[in-house]
């Protein structure tokens, strides 16, 4: 995890925030490229049982992670 980076204090916090920012920027760039490509080529995905299962599983995982994130935030604030 980013908070386990070597270093102390402000240096460690700055490095963790920089890594988080780079990760977010890379994801945003990926989404921009993928969505632009889909719009330009007119790509329309087809339904498949595997795709539906994948969507359900990722949705459940995202809700679990959101709940864990909220719980961690509450603990850190108090």
Image (cartoon, rainbow, N blue to C red):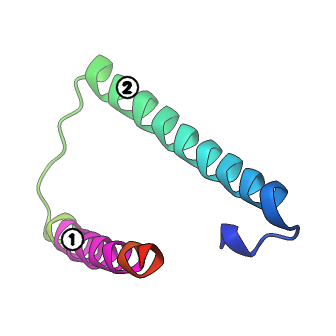
Q: Secondary structure at mark 2?
A: helix
Q: Residue furthest top?
A: 40
Left or right, 6 with reference to 33: right
Rendered view: 26 above or below 53: above
| CA gap, disc 2 and disc 1 | 23 Å
Q: Is residue 12 magenta?
A: no
Q: Is residue 48 positioned above or below 26 on the image?
A: below
- Residue 25 lies, in percent from the top left, at 55, 38
> What residue did someone put label 2 on?
37
Q: Which residue is mark 1?
A: 50
The magenta stretch is 54-72
Q: Residue at x 65, y 51 (%)?
A: 17
What secondary structure characterizes most of the magenta part? helix
Give the residue drawn at x 32%, y 73%: 70
Which quadrant of the figure has residue 61?
bottom left
Circle 1: is it few (<14), some (14-19), or many (20+) Cα within 10 Å?
few
């Amino acid at each position: 995890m980013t908070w386990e980076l070597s270093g102390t204090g402000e240096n460690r916090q700055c490095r963790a925030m920089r890594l988080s920012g780079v990760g977010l920027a890379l994801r945003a760039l990926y989404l921009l490229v993928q969505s632009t490509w889909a719009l330009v080529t007119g790509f329309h995905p087809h339904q498949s049982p595997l795709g539906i299962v994948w969507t359900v599983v990722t949705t459940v995982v995202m809700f679990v992670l959101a709940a864990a994130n909220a719980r961690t935030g509450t603990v850190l604030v108090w």
